[in-house]
Amino acid sequence: MPLAADEAYFVAWGQQLSWIYYDHPPLTGWISWMINLVSTSGYGHRIFSLLLGIASCFVFFRFLTLRYHVKRASEFAPLFLSLPITILLFSLFVNDSLLFAALTLFFTATFVSLQNCQDQQSGSWRYAIIAGIGFGLATLVKFTAIVYFAAIGLLLLLNPGYYRFLFGQYVVVGFTGFLLFLLTLIPNYYNCGINLAFNFVFRDSTASLNGLWQFLGSLVLLMGPMIFFWKPVVLLKNLRDERYFFSSAFLVTVALLAFIAFNRGEFGLHWAAPLTMLGILATAEQLTEDRNNRVLRLNLMYSSLLIVPAAIGLFLLTQGSPLVLDHFDNTSRYRANQINDIRNGSLLEEIDKRFPGVLLVTDSYGLVSMMESKDAETAMMFNDNSVFGRNHDIFRDYRDYEGRDILFLSTEYIDGDGDLNRHASVFDEASILRVSGQQGDYEVVYGKGFDYQRYREKYISVTFEKLYDKIPALYGACYMDRYR
């Protein structure tokens, strides 16, 4: 299966080792950089995700062994591998895979620390530090890790019997995690607070029930059949019972995420991916062996019904099959063919042959990342309206392109004189040309003599107005200051 756009984007992060990347904290980029030392194709990254999945499954099995016994662990461990989200996450290299694994360590080590504390056994503080490391690593992947830490803390606060752990070992968990979290907070201070800005400033949000419905739909889609085997009434009556710790944690986390979804007015399916691990741990608390076997069979059927048709459809799509493309509108078909011709190399080969030494740019972070994976000299430009994937704002200096010839590859049909006039203003001379790949023909704007000052006035100034000037002045420096 070819690299997805987001995969290519995170692989591209690894082209430079940095304390800061645009969208999220830096751990994904650090790991990508280390993998790139061995393989830059992207498939080495997928092998890493697979190994990470195996390690996470081992942690899950080991935890069930400590909490119950080997037989029960063997019965319930397959649940970990039977859901579409776990199969998908550990088949792809995305930051959600790293977040899932780090939070798995946090959830399981926190409970072992709590259990040892309650039973006054040794090892409670040691597991608290391990849990803190898991939490800290999660914060170095995505800020949503803090929601899960807060949910566990709120559950502990609701039960006075947990107070000794809450104000002892759980403080150590939080402090250990915070020490790691400083590795992203400090670089943010010297880089516009960009991770915080992307997640909490750039993206407009309005409270809406749409966000709540999206969250509930995501929850059912992620959890699959096993959520229908739960007993909500029993869980609510036993909210403070340690036997149902993860079931209670799941309910508290759902309440927090539902509140966030409503206030944001939207909710992405992948945002709740780590909730699946809490759901699996909660399911292990509730099901007998017989019911577990039924859930496992249903999960496998559910995963097959989702993954097999999707895999077949994706394969046909990458082959440019009319069976799939004929169902697309013209713009979607154009983009699909364009992506396929970048992946198979035919479009880049044509461009390199006709325009040697040209700088190839696009307004899509997905396309630019795919072209980078093919070793093309490329940059993301002409995208003043987008808040996503602006990693090149940090790692490219547009002043360096002064006088260069540039080929602009749009993700949409070139709108004749309209698009030509819009882009031509930053060049000494520009024209619309046609390039071809195996699956289609594409119009491009070919500009000679890039003028940085005109680009700054027409595009970078707009980016300041729409994005960077909105950031509260709570940071020490900003990489965009070089353009002011």
Image (spheres, rainbow, N blue to C red):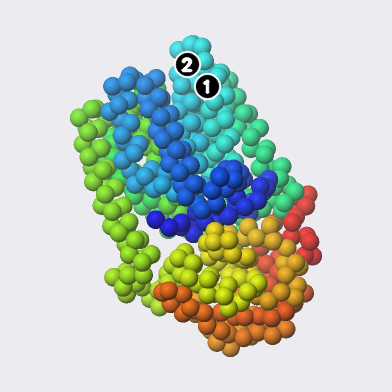
Instruction: Judge from the rendering whether residue 193 lies leftward or rightward of residue 303; answer left or right.
Output: right
**SS for callout 1:** helix
Q: CA distance from mark 2 to mark 1?
A: 9 Å
Residue 337 in the image: state x and y as whole percent: 43, 72
Amino acid under disc 1: Tyr
**SS for callout 2:** helix
Foreground pick, 138 / 59: 59
Residue 300 in the image: state x and y as whole percent: 26, 43
The reply to whether callout 2 and callout 1 are in contact (CB within 8 Å) is yes
Amino acid under disc 2: Asn
Label 1 neighbourhood size at 10 Å, few (<14), some (14-19), many (20+)? many
Of pointers 2 and 1, the one earlier in the residue sequence = 2
Q: Quadrant of the C terminus?
A: bottom right
Q: Residue at x 43, y 74 (%)?
A: 438
Q: Residue at x 61, y 77 (%)?
A: 355
Q: Quadrant of the N terminus?
A: bottom left
Q: Can you tell which mark lies on residue 127?
A: 1
Q: Is residue 396 above or below residue 474?
A: below
Q: Residue at x 48, y 31 (%)?
A: 105
- Reading the image, the residue beneath label 2 is 116
